[in-house]
Image (tube, grey):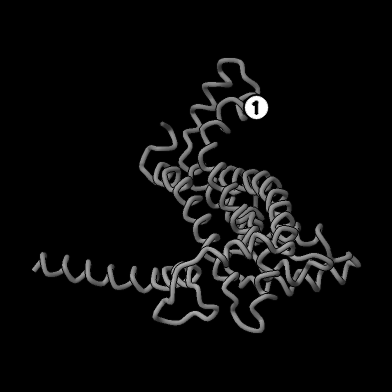
Amino acid sequence: MIESRHLALSFVTLLVTSFVLLPIVAIVLFSFNTARFYSLPIEGLTLSWYLDLFADARVKESLLVSIGVALAVTIISTIVGTFFAFFVARAYGRFKNIIAITGFLPLVVPPLVVAAGLQVAFVAFGLSLGYATVISGHVIYTTPFVTLMVLSQLIRYDRRLDAAARDLGAGRLQTLRLVTLPILWPSIRSAAILAFLLSFNEWAIAFFTGRGFNTLPMLVYSMQRNGLPPTVLAYSALSILVVVLMTVLILPVIIRIIRPGASNE
């Protein structure tokens, strides 16, 4: 009976995994197809769509914009999200829970709703839509993810380590800089990588709150409105590759965070 349950569970797991991976495999496969239209059977293999992608001046410009925005968002959201994690884990007060819930709202509100709301708010306050508004919107969107990753390790942090450091003469800032942050660094680093990926691949907020430039997702969206060109498939395949590589970097840290006692190793 137990063996049959294991077999059934393995089959369901394989079925779900195949269902999830099938679109990814199809994108990668058709990105190498010599035909301009994605259809089976594959006519041949080529790298021309990747070469066309890198030769497009619009792609290069949009890539630089996306990297610049994502780097700015990563720095700001990592700092803000880390401090907010400290607030959620260690602050006291009557309004702490209300503030914490408000800070995590972007996690549950659909990105399109967040994007539309941000556009209305920026226009209402008389702000010009541009780089600053896109960065601000992405910071609002990514900060809760940073907070959750740091908080997952901070709530199990042994505060006796801080007490021991202060007993040895370290001040609060010294304890934070030399003891607390180094222990939390794996989760902070992973949160920063996640924030970069979220900002780099985000479309809705950039579309609603940016004017006068295109991020890479905005450009790809404009390219596929009249059909899906092979260069978009090439871009998608490269994006998948980047996400996989970043996940490989993050995964060991996530495993270390969720493993019992890992925060004190």
Quick check: 55 above or below 160? Answer: below
Residue positioned 60% across, 76% down in the render: 229
Q: Is residue 75 visible?
A: yes
Asked whether the viewer can see residue 139, the reply is: no
Q: Position of residue 90 (x, y in %)?
A: 58, 42
Image coordinates of residue 113 in percent, x first then y, are 67, 75
Horizontal side of 24 relative to 236 (left or right) equals left
Q: Where is residue 182 shown, x and y percent of the image?
A: 55, 31
Q: Residue furthest left?
A: 1
Question: Viewed as shown, does residue 64 lie left or right of 198?
Answer: right
Q: At which x and y percent is residue 153? A: 48, 43
Name the one closer to the observer, 2 or 16.
Answer: 16
Q: Quadrant of residue 9?
A: bottom left
Residue drawn at x 79%, y 66% as measured from the top left: 210
Q: On the image, numbered disc 1 is attached to which residue?
A: 172
Report which quarter residue 259 is drawn in.
Answer: top left
Crowd tier of the residue under label 1, counting other residues whose Cα lies within 10 Å: few below 14, some 14–19, many 20 or above: few
Q: Nearer the viewer, residue 25 or 37?
A: 37
Q: Quadrant of residue 142?
A: bottom right
